[in-house]
Image (cartoon, rainbow, N blue to C red):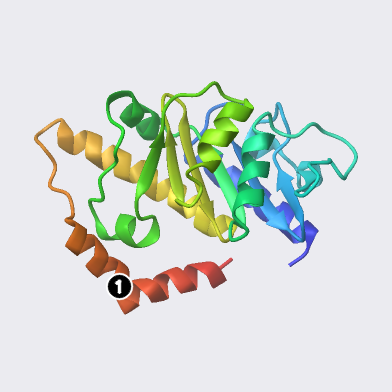
Amino acid sequence: MSSQAIREELCKYAQKTVSNKLVVGPGGNLSARFEGKMYLSPSGFALDEIKPEQWVEVDIETGHITDIGLRPSSEVLMHLYAYRQNPNIGAMVHTHPPYCIAFTLVEKELPIMFPDQAALVGKTVYVDYVLPTTDKLADAVVAKIEHASILLGNHGLVTTGRNLREAYYRTEVVEESAKIFLIATAIKQPKVLTKEEFEEIASLESEAYRIELLQKMK
């Protein structure tokens, strides 16, 4: 892996984020860690417009922008604090998925309802609405960054992973979970997985294999 490969991979998942309608216009931001630096989407760009050389390189320890050119996303502090807090995070995806936002308007706790959600995401936590782009939002997210998925009230979703594929896939799974919950709730109270059922799925060797395979696939 090289910084150029990281930049190209960011473009790939940025385009998937837009094509799957997880953001609209210049919303959302993605980043990935590589050798003490993070590569973050620039401010003012729609994600699918970003070219490999336009991802902004930021030194994680100092916060200095270490390449020439564009301003980083206005959510730079959220990404920077997360990488400093948890060295196991290799990538972060912040999106505005419509079902996730709709869910936060009426609920806070997203239950675990199906196997992929249990195995690949686990518990999704919630942060009350905080003004975007501020250090207060960055602090609120980092306080719960041990969880791989965080719903932001009236705002969107943050997912993390050991690589971009994992972080992005978690975004899709959480959005699908919110969609399923809202559809089911319109009919009657959904049946969710019990704590025992969730733990049983998490312990399955086949699920552990799927997660391991996910890390290796490009």
Residue 89 coordinates in the image, percent (x, y) = 59, 56
Give the amino acid type for the residue marked by disc 1 in the picture. Ser
Give the quarter of the image for residue 197: bottom left
**Residue visible at 56% across and 30% down?**
137
In the rendered image, residue 215, in percent from the top left (x then y), is placed at 53, 68
How many neighbours does mark 1 have within 10 angstroms: few (below 14), some (14-19), or many (20 or more)? few
Q: The N terminus is located in which quarter? A: bottom right
Q: Is residue 120 above or below residue 135?
A: below
In the figure, is residue 135 to the left or right of 72?
left
Q: Residue furthest right?
A: 68
Q: Quick check: 110 left or right of 23?
A: left
Q: Quadrant of residue 175?
A: top left
Question: Vertical placement of 122 versus 95: above or below?
Answer: below
Residue visible at 31% across and 39% down in the picture: 178
Residue highlighted by disc 1: 203
Q: Residue at x 55, y 72 (%)?
A: 216
Q: Position of residue 33 (x, y in %)?
A: 69, 55
Q: The C terminus is located in which quarter?
A: bottom right
Q: Residue furthest left?
A: 188
Front residue of this view, candidates 205 and 109: 109
Q: Is residue 20 visible?
A: yes
Which residue is more in the foreground, 138 or 132?
A: 138
